[in-house]
């Protein structure tokens, strides 16, 4: 399975600021995804990071709030913009592998606290 | 609308016992059903997965039982160990219509195995 590294692993940010989270994969992957996991909750897909084109966002998530970059097949960033305490969550990068990209592997996550 | 319902929310089992976690889904287009294990501070790790063409899959102490007609699937952990204490998520995805791989997660089950 791919090794996925996320930076930072955690951060405490002031409301109104922005944080960019990096996701680095040790091999080229077609599919990369960003998830949010609110405290004690399940995982919710934010968007699919498409290489060379705009990300595809899920209902309830918009590009202005969560801009995503995918400059190549091993790297992606997620920015959480104009943060509020409600954005306090764990943000997870995921890649799809295996036949049909059916197996999803996750990074260790970025624990964000907005104060 | 929650497409994957998971129960129980929490589960306490004695060492050596059997842990059973259940999930039910609504979308008949789902054709891939993975289970993830998450330890505190870590990203979810793929544990075992099943496709609807089989009714059961076993890997070591972990077994998935799948009932297509009832749209239910469950995870059985045999001989549960304290090291199995973690949060378990069921998930489902669909590849129909050439859709990209997306996972819909259940809300998670916090498993505690007492020594």
Image (tube, coloured by chain):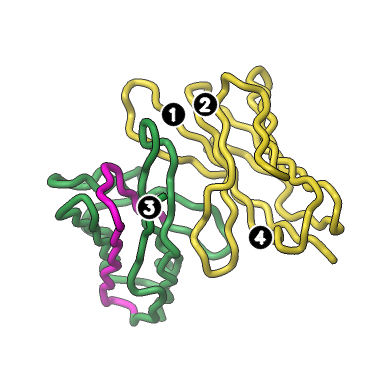
Mark 2 falls within which chain?
B
- Tell me whether the residue at label 1 lies in contact with that at label 3, contact meaning CB atoms closer than 8 angstroms: no
**Residue A82 picture quarter:** bottom left
Q: Residue at x 59, y 48 (%)?
A: B89
- The residue pinned by badge 3 equals A2
Specify start and end residues of the magenta stretch as a single range: A15-35
- The numbered dot on residue B86 is 4
**Chain letter, yellow:** B
Mark 4 falls within which chain?
B
Of the image marks 1 and 4, the number of the one nearer the N terminus: 4
- Along the viewing direction, whichever of A59 and B49 lies nearer the viewer: B49
To the question of a shared chain for discs 1 and 3, the answer is no
**Mark 2 crowd level (few <14, some 14–19, many ≥20, 10 Å Cα):** few
**Residue A81 picture quarter:** bottom left
Mark 1 falls within which chain?
B
Q: Nearer the viewer, mark 3 or mark 2?
A: 3
- Tell me whether the residue at label 1 lies in contact with that at label 4, contact meaning CB atoms closer than 8 angstroms: no
- Along the viewing direction, whichever of B18 and A27 lies nearer the viewer: A27
SS of the residue under disc 4: strand
- Tell me whether the residue at label 1 lies in contact with that at label 2, contact meaning CB atoms closer than 8 angstroms: yes
Give the alpha-carbon distance from disc 1 to disc 3, as whole Å: 22 Å
Q: Colour of chain A?
A: green
Q: Quadrant of the C terminus of chain B?
A: bottom right
């Amino acid at each position: 399975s791919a090794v996925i590294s996320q930076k930072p692993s955690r951060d405490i940010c002031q409301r109104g600021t922005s944080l960019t989270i990096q996701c680095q994969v040790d091999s080229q992957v077609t599919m990369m995804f960003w998830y949010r996991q609110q405290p004690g909750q399940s995982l919710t897909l934010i968007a699919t990071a498409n290489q060379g084109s705009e990300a595809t966002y899920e209902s309830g998530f918009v590009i202005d709030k969560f801009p995503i970059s995918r400059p190549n097949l091993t790297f992606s960033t997620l920015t959480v913009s104009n943060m509020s305490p409600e954005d306090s969550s764990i943000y997870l990068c995921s890649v799809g592998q295996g036949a049909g990209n059916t197996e999803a592997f996750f990074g260790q996550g970025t624990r964000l606290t907005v104060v | 609308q929650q497409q994957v319902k998971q129960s129980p929310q929490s589960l306490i089992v004695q060492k050596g016992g059997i842990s059973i976690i259940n999930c039910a889904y609504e979308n008949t287009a789902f054709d891939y059903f993975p289970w993830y294990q998450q330890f505190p501070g870590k990203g979810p790790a793929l544990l075992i997965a099943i496709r609807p063409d089989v009714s059961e899959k076993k890997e070591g102490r972990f077994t998935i039982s799948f009932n297509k007609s009832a749209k239910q699937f469950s995870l059985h952990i045999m001989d549960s160990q304290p090291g199995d204490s973690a949060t378990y998520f069921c998930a489902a995805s669909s590849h129909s219509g050439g859709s990209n791989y997306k996972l819909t997660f259940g809300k998670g089950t916090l498993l505690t195995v007492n020594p």
